[in-house]
Image: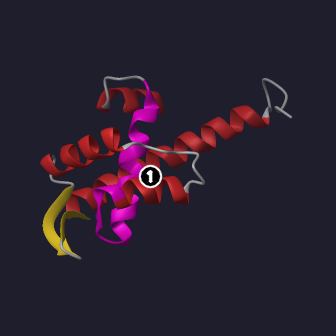
Amino acid sequence: MYYCHLMRRDTNPNFMNGVPELLILRLLQQQEMYGYEIVQAIRERTGSVVAIGEGVGYPVLHGMEQDGALKSRRKSVNGRSRIYYSLTKRGARRLSDLAEDWSKLTVAVRMVLAGGQYGEAIP
């Protein structure tokens, strides 16, 4: 059932594609940030396990803004103009949905790795 839900929403069966969106939404739930700051925060907060480049980050940000999940504003900081992103109500709902999906997926993968009825745990 979970996979049907995932496949219905995303025609690409590679479920890892949702990771940047999930992480970006979570970071922006905490505070508004600019693009490069988001890319760096993902790298730092995941211990470099997840490292998205600007070539991934910016298209995801722009797509989520077009979908109404984010809003942006231009802000001048130390003489530099930056675009800061923040979460909208639609983005908060999207974050909640994605977090629930990823929680279910994590539990399912852990169950398989732990072994059980059909196999032994992976050491």
Q: Nearer the viewer, residue 44 or 78?
A: 78
Q: Give the amino acid at mark 1.
A: Ala
State the colouring used for the structure image: secondary structure
| Rendered view: 22 above or below 115 | below
| Rendered view: 98 above or below 96 | above
The residue drawn where x is 53% and y is 44% is 104
Describe the element under mark 1 as helix, strand or loop.
Answer: helix
- Is 1 within the magenta? no
Residue 70, given in percent of the width and then of the height, sits at 20, 58
Residue 46, given in percent of the width and then of the height, sits at 56, 54
Magenta range is 14-36
Q: What secondary structure is the stretch in magenta mostly built from? A: helix
Q: Most extreme residue toward the bottom, as rendered? A: 78
| Rendered view: 6 above or below 12 | below
Quadrant of residue 19 within the rendered picture: top left
The residue drawn where x is 78% and y is 37% is 114
For the C terminus, the quadrant is top right
Residue 120, given in percent of the width and then of the height, sits at 85, 28
- Is 23 within the magenta? yes
> Disc 1 designates what residue?
99
The residue drawn where x is 79% and y is 28% is 117
Residue 17, given in percent of the width and then of the height, sits at 40, 34
The residue drawn where x is 21% and y is 54% is 69
